[in-house]
Amino acid sequence: MYALVEFKGKQYKAEKGAVLKVDRIDAEPGATVDIDSVLLVSKGGSPDTVTVGAPYVTGAKVSAVVESHGKDPKIIVFKYMPKKDYRRKQGHRQQYSIIKIQDIVGA
């Protein structure tokens, strides 16, 4: 059984026990997060029973636990114009959270 969820503007495939790297969540490690914006639920079987939402599946919910937080490696954004003495250097480190999917409640 798996579900496609929309979380913070991005889509993820959530399976029970899966570990997802998502944008930073304002929750402490160990806290439970419920995701209500489920786009699709597929229940395993010989013919897969797929429920597609319009836009979301009503009554479907994915619960996850926040495991940790972190930062990606730094990327360098460097802009320049040749022969114009224009140089700009900027760095960025994206923050993320690691969540573990606990349960998928389908409609």
Image: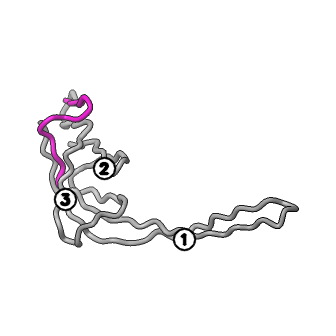
Residue 51 counted in the magenta span: yes
Amino acid type indicated by mark 2: Phe
Q: Which residue is mark 2?
A: 7
Q: Give the residues drawn in magenta, as a range.
A: 49-63
Q: Verify CB contact (< 8 Å) between mark 2 and mark 3.
A: no
Amino acid type indicated by mark 1: Lys
Amino acid type indicated by mark 3: Val
Residue 50 counted in the magenta span: yes
Residue 87 coordinates in the image, percent (x, y): 75, 67
Q: Which residue is mark 1?
A: 74
CA gap between label 2 and label 3 equals: 11 Å
Local SS, label 1:
loop
Quick one: label 1 or label 3, which is nearer the N terminus?
3
Local SS, label 3:
strand
Which residue is drawn at the image coordinates 27% and 49% (left, top)? 14
Which residue is drawn at the image coordinates 16% and 62% (left, top)? 32
Residue 77 lies in what quarter of the image? bottom right
Residue 102 coordinates in the image, percent (x, y): 17, 57
Residue 24 coordinates in the image, percent (x, y): 34, 64
- Colouring: one colour
Q: Quadrant of the C terminus?
A: top left
Local SS, label 2:
strand
Q: Which residue is mark 3?
A: 33
Above or below 94: residue 34: above
Above or below 30: residue 35: above
Q: Quadrant of the N terminus?
A: top left
